[in-house]
Amino acid sequence: MSAPSAVSTATAAPAKPAQPEGAGILIPASKVHQATKTELLGVLASDPSFKREGGRVPRLVGILATEKEDARSYAEFTRKSCESLGIEYELRLVGPARRTLGDQPNVSIGVEEAILEANDDPEVDGIMVYYPIHGGSQDQYLQQCVSPYKDVEGLNHKFLFNLYHNVRYISPKTLSAIPASHLPESLQANKDDIPPPGTVKSVLPCTPLAIVKVLEFVGVYNKLLAYGDRARGKVITVINRSEVVGRPLGALLANDGARVLSVDIDSIVEFSKRPSSALAHTSRFNPHHVVTPTDLTLQECLRVSDVVISAVPHKDYKVKTEWLKDGCVCVNVAGDKNFEADVRQKASIYVPSVGQMTIAMLQRNLLRLRKYREMATQNEQEANLF
């Protein structure tokens, strides 16, 4: 990937590989992750309730119901990442996953029961389920079985509703949104990302959030602009409109001000917070993105895109380098590489994976939800005193 340095070994230290001339910068997820890990370690160290002496170490439970090796590898990677922070991680095997341990299939409980047991366990602070299990609507049903107080993946309908409606703050007592129409005017105009009194930040799906953190790190988000509008002026193409990553990511980026071109196998649509129709601004609810059809082709989308994000789960799918806008930022989300090998000849920055950041956002959600649950319990206890 890179040519050796021309510096003479007789007068210098061993040469380090040099970046190919004219090539964009390769930024691994591990580089983005460093600051987030420091942030998480700081939270764990500063909060007495998270410490082993006098507190309780946060505990994450993973539920694995598949025999697929990639899911097991992801679970093992999550375990190691949690241990490096001092977070307890327990993997619970159910259904087909137990067969590899020699158990009979009828001995193990089902996924839904495993989720409900973890919901009821006060020692469990977060639950993640390794999908896909059944696929389609059945998996979506299981996502709603996870208590929102323990949904570290941010897939519960309460959180998705907030994301799609651009509701950024919630009540920890119910984890319900407070509509802008019911907030005092002074609390609606929040330019600094400070939750109004009595509220906390809503939880976001961990993979879309990880991608946003990557874009913040590489400078796509403009920190000089007001919070909630920092992606303004950017055109971003997101390839694959899945319900877990592509669609919520498109909404998230559009609600931050970007023009998002969402590409799926049968259509291309545009997510935007600034639609041409004035009618879209007459709603009494929170201003949020709208989705409109477009006649653009993928090639036309790529030609104008400052950022290209691809999440196609197929080893043969490749984004053509020649179609990319010169100097764009490319982010690969899929397990397979969705970009051609010479992507850095056009891209100024290329991020080959976001998996490490996805787990970091999952861990951040874990710590937040643990505190939200404690706040809700405290509020309930105080209410019972009167």
Image: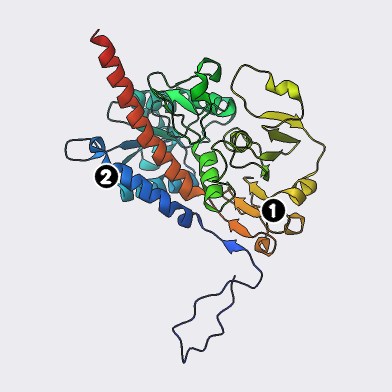
Residue underneath mark 1: 318
Disc marking residue 45: 2
Determine if residue 157 is in view: no
Is residue 127 toward the left or the right of residue 339 in the image?
left
Few, some or many C-alpha atoms within 10 Å of disc 1 (few <14, some 14-19, many ≥20)?
some
Mark 1 or mark 2: name the one nearer the start of the chain. Answer: 2
The answer to whether residue 9 is left or right of residue 336 is left
Look at the image and tell me whether residue 292 can be seen: yes
The percent position of residue 93, horizontal first and vertical second, equals 38, 36
Residue contact at pointers 1 and 2, CB within 8 angstroms: no
At label 2, which amino acid type do we have?
Answer: Ala
Q: Where residue 267 appears, x then y in whole percent?
A: 76, 35
The secondary element bearing badge 2 is classed as helix
Vertical arrangement, residue 329 with respect to residue 311, above or below: below
Between the C-alphas of marks 1 and 2, the distance is 43 Å
Residue appearing at x 79%, y 49% in the figure: 299
Quadrant of the image occupied by residue 283:
top right
